[in-house]
Each structure stands twice: as structure tokens, then as C-alpha cells.
Image: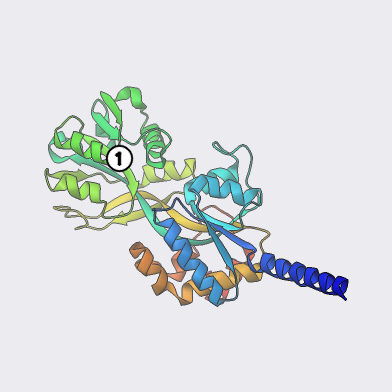
Amino acid sequence: MKATHTILAAAVLAISATSLAQAQQVRLMTGPQGGSWYPLGGAIANIAGKEGVKMQVLPGAGIANVKAIQIGKADMGFGNSISTVDGVAGRAPFEKKTDNVCNVATLYPQYFQIVANADSGITSFADAKGKSIAIQPKGNTAEFMTVQMLEVYGMTYKDMDKVSHVSYTDAVSMLKDNNAQLFTLGTTIPASSIMDLASARDITLISVPDDKYKAMHDLNPGYTKLIIPAGTYPKQDKDVQAVAYATHLIARCDLPEDTVYKVLKGMVDNQADLNAIAQVMKKTTVKMMAEDIGVPLHKGAERFYKEQKVM
């Protein structure tokens, strides 16, 4: 009898462990704790739970998330569109093509912003030649985009008077003191650092014309074209065209279609919960979520968007 009880107990434990493993099958990689991606991931996990999909939220980072999904260490995660596109193409920092990474939803835009002191004489990015510029440390997304922007204008860092790889705060201080005349950064709008600069000096926001946008898009299909509306910053009296990329949700291409469908449906049905975490998502529409950003669309997402008649 004792042996029978032991066997039954073991069986119950085994069944419970199996059920738990199945219940926790979706691992969602977000960002570092303290950043915006981690709490946003928590909100998505709560929503997914209501749809019957149990999620485990894990910290991560854009490039790391893509790599983890590719090798099966994660099921879903957040990414930056341009980095994910590099993975799909097999470009550095990826060692090979990430052929098991699919797009689920484009969530909100990040703008590559080019700002100059109004008295610098810079009205086009071409005017940056011979000037002092402040950009992020090497390896940051906006630093890489600055290199590409210089490339499409036929320049390199060598054409600058001085290049300072610094934080946003230090960049603003440099422009305030006129130790730099131009500043590039990649973030949402309005950027607090640009608002800080505009509180001390008149600024000029530099627009990217269509031909240069096309050249950037040729370098990376993950780039999109967006407008920074007039009035976003003090004394900005006209719209400014910018190169942009997106924070998006990705998943293993072989993750069950129904799982991705349920998660996406829950996100759309409960978008107010996501807006409370990321205010920038208030303008996100289902049509925007379905946008082609150069990453293959997951079958579950494709099914949902077709039902919504946005593709």
C-alpha cells in the first residue's frame, strides 16, 4: 500500500510538473529592469493570461532578444526593427541569418533626430561638414545611423571638425556651450534632451529629404519615414521629415499560430492597458501594427490582421 501511494504521489507530481511546463511555455524577453520594455512585457503577459496563454517575462535587450528567439531560448520578445532586419539579412552583429524570427506587431516609432544650434548655419545635414558634432558612444543605434547618414551624404567622421561620442546630457551641454553645433539621437518625440537644449538656445531641427531617406532605406529596409509635426519643439514652425524605426514584438516563426493570434488579439482588445505603460502607444492603430518593416510576418499575426481587414 505504501509503495502504491508513493507511485501515485510521483505520478501526480510528474503530471503537475508537465502541466506547469506547458502552462509556462511562452517565454517573453523584454528589456533591462528599469526600462520601458520590462513593464510593457508584464502588461502583455497579464493580457495573454486572460486569453489562456501563460507567459514568463524575462529581461533582455533588442539584439539579444533576436538571438535568443532564433536559437529557441525565448518564444517572443521586443526588438528594434532595424536590428531585427540586420538579423534576417545575416549582417553584423549577427553571425548568420535569423530565419526563425518573425514579426508580430509594430508597436511605436523611434525617430532619428538631427538638431543644430540655430546660429550654426546648419539647415541641411550636408552643412555638418567641417562642424563639431555630438553623438552617442559607438555601438548605439543612433551612432550607427549617424554613420549611415554621413555615408548617404558622401561623408565620414573624418569630414567633421570634431566628433564627440557622449551621453544625451553631455551632448546638450556641448551645444549649449557651442562646443558642438549638431546633435543626433534616436528616441521618441518630443525628446526631453532636445527640449532641454531648446530651453537655453534657439534650435533648428534638420529634415531628411526623400532622396536621402530612400538611400537610407536601401541600406536597411527596416527604416521608415515619419514626420515630426510642427510645434513638437519650441519655435518649430513646420513639419520635419525624419528617418525612423520601430519597437516591435517578435516571435519564433514556428511558435503555434493560435498562440500568437491569441496574444495579438488580447493586445488589441486591451490596448488601454498597454497605453498606461507606454504613452507613446496611444497613437498606435491596428493598421500600424501590421506595417511591413522588412521582417517576415508570423502566420498567427497574418491571420489576425486579415480578419481586421488591414492587410
The amino acid at mark 1 is: Thr
Secondary structure beneath dot 1 equals strand
Looking at the figure, which quarter contains the N terminus? bottom right
Please indicate whether residue 89 sits to the left or right of residue 147 in the image.
right
Foreground residue among 240 and 195 = 195
Image quarter of residue 183: top left
Coordinates of residue 87 in the picture (x, y in percent): 57, 44
Q: Which residue is denoted by mark 1 in the rendering?
A: 184
Q: Is residue 126 visible?
A: yes
Foreground residue among 263 and 297 = 263
The residue under the point 44% across, 49% down is 223
Q: Is residue 85 visible?
A: no
The residue under the point 64% across, 39% down is 96
Please indicate whether residue 270 sits to the left or right of residue 172 in the image.
right
Is the residue marked by circle 1 packed among few (<14), some (14-19), or many (20+) residues within 10 Å? many
Q: How many numbered badges does the structure rendering display? A: 1
What colour scheme was applied to this rendering of the protein?
rainbow
The extreme front residue here reads 2
Coordinates of residue 215 in the picture (x, y in percent): 43, 41
Foreground residue among 291 and 179 = 179
Coordinates of residue 237 in the picture (x, y in percent): 16, 55
Coordinates of residue 311 in the picture (x, y in percent): 53, 69
Please indicate whether residue 259 sits to the left or right of residue 120 in the image.
right
Please indicate whether residue 72 sits to the left or right of residue 157 in the image.
right
Foreground residue among 257 and 296 = 257
